[in-house]
Amino acid sequence: MVRVTVDRAADGGICGFRASGHTGCGTAGQDIVCAAVSALTQTAVLGLQEHLGIAVELAAGPGLLECRLPDAVPQAWWLRAQDILETMCLGLEAVAAQRPQAIRLRGARPPARGQGDGDHDPLGI
C-alpha cells in the first residue's frame, strides 16, 4: 500500500507531503497505480522547483518521496505553491477513489472551517 500524508499549516495551506510504500497492484515497472502516484507527486515537486523556483527540502529513495516547503516562502509564491500542491491532492484523491485498497491518503482535504481550531460555530462563519 502507498501511504501519502499531506501536512498542512494552521491556516490549512499545504507545507509538505510524504509518499511512501508500494501499491502491490502490479510488478515493478508495470504498476499503474504506483506510476500515477509517482507522476503526481514528482510533477508537483518539479512545478515547485522549476516553475516557481522554490528550493524545497527533499528526501527521496526507493518507495519514498518527501517534500517540504521552506519556512521563508514569500506570500505570493506560497499562494502559487498551494495551487500546485492542491492540484496534486485532487489527482491523488481521484486515484484513491479508483483504487482505495492501494492508497491511504491523509490530509488531502483542508479541515472544514471551525474544526480543529477550537471554533465550533455551526454556521461556519
Image (cartoon, rainbow, N blue to C red):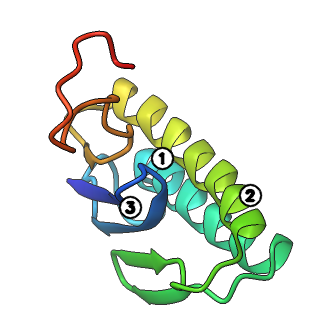
Q: Which mark is residue 80?
A: 2
Looking at the image, is mark 2 or mark 1 earlier in the sequence? 1
Q: How many marks?
A: 3
Q: Position of residue 113 (x, y in %)?
A: 34, 29
Residue on which the image places disc 1: 32
Q: Answer with left or right where residue 19 lies relative to residue 115.
A: right
Give whichever of 31, 46 is nearer the camera: 46
Q: Residue at x 31, y 10 (%)?
A: 123
- Residue to which mark 3 is pinned: 9
Q: Amino acid at mark 1?
A: Ile
Q: Residue furthest right?
A: 51
Using a 10 Å C-alpha cutoff, classify the residue at mark 2 as few (fewer than 14 neighbours), some (14 to 19) or many (20 or more): some
Task: Tell me if mark 3 has few (under 14), some (14-19) or many (20+) residues whose alpha carbon lies within 10 angstroms of its own.
Answer: few
Relative to 8, residue 15 above or below: below
- As helix, strand or loop, the secondary structure at mark 2 comes to helix
> Label 2 is placed on what type of residue?
Arg
Q: Residue at x 21, y 44 (%)?
A: 117
Q: Earlier in the sequence, mark 3 or mark 1?
A: 3
The correct choice, above or below, for 55 with respect to 107 in the image is below
Q: Secondary structure at mark 3?
A: loop
User: x, y percentage for residue 8?
Assistant: 37, 58
On-image quarter of the C terminus: top left
Q: Position of residue 52 (x, y in %)?
A: 81, 73
- Is the Cβ of the residue at disc 3 closer than 8 Å to that at disc 2? no
Residue 114 percent across, percent down from the top left: 27, 30
| Left or right position of 86 against 51 | left
Q: Quadrant of residue 74?
A: bottom right
- Residue 118's tag is none
